[in-house]
Amino acid sequence: MKKTAVITGAGSGFGLETARLAAARGMNLVLVDVQADALDKAVAEFRDVEVLARVVDVAKAAPMEALAEAVQARFGAPHFVFNNAGVGAGGLVWENALSDWDWVMGVNLMGVVHGVRLFTPMMLAAAKADPAYSGHIVNTASMAGLLVPPMSGVYNVSKAAVVALTETLHHDLRMVTEQVHASLLCPFYVPTGISQSQRNRPGDLPGATPTQSQLVSQAQTDKAVSSGKLTAADVAAMVFDAIDHNKFYIFSHPKALAGLQTRMEDAMLQRNPTDPYAARPDIGEALKAKLRAG
């Protein structure tokens, strides 16, 4: 029986590259994105596998429920679910509008929540019915959810929640099955479309005129993302390596884990959080100067 992959944020970046690898493995594809033109372009690539494509805002419960029903009816329980859709917002945390919180938490956290709550029961039922069935859920968080850098508060919070959700999912699955597994993807700076995610911001959650800190944050993120050496295709290969070898943590840039170790040591030693720019004080001072100039 052919396997099925459900991929959100499938129109670009990690989602599209993962879909390409899934298709190369002969999997049925369920491609989900909020951007119709990007999704149409992606679908046009896949002529040798069966594709179900849906334009869905993953933050919304009802469309996600309809998606899950369509997947069940067309393919049965999926074997791979990639809860990957994500958006970003920056700036000093008190300057983010409520609409920023609603948008980012809706997509980054509730999109993953919906994927977990809707597809996990289907996968568990398939596992119970068939000892040969195996399933894997991969949730996209970010190193931002582990390193909590300044001027990324809304994004940090959303991704930290995905870390906690996915680690809990791993433990919960282990309590009930050996056939369904979970992995946590924490990419660092990789050239994808997330730095320009405002293009897909819904009209009912409009953004305000950017503040000075939000403009500084956007410029910093654009520069960091565009200069990334690793590609989305590289990260997609890491995702399938984790599935093949049942690895939970997927880190695109393992060297960045030194910052996580420092953060954990700060907590264990009950010292104040270490300056994230301690190793590059020139960058930290330049950012402070820009923020205080206004």
Image: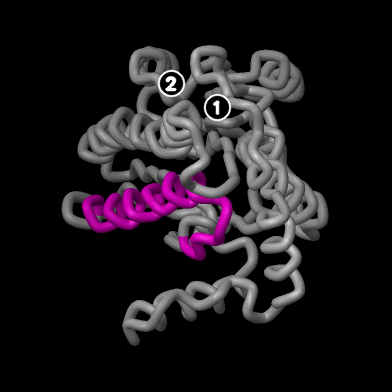
Q: CA distance from mark 2 to mark 1?
A: 8 Å
Residue 146 in percent (x, y) is at 47, 62
Q: Which residues are magenta?
A: 146-173
Q: Which residue is mark 1?
A: 28
Residue 53 in percent (x, y) is at 57, 16
Residue 91 in percent (x, y) is at 59, 46
Q: Does residue 21 appear in this view?
A: no
Q: Is residue 207 left or right of residue 174?
A: right
State the scheme by which the image is colored. one colour
Based on the picture, tell me whether residue 110 belongs to the magenta stretch: no
Q: Identify the residue at horizontal 47%, vertical 56% (top origin).
A: 145
Q: Nearer the viewer, residue 122 or 150?
A: 150
Q: Secondary structure at mark 2?
A: helix
Disc number placed over residue 154 in the picture, else none: none
Q: Which residue is mark 2?
A: 75
Q: Nearer the viewer, residue 116 or 159?
A: 159
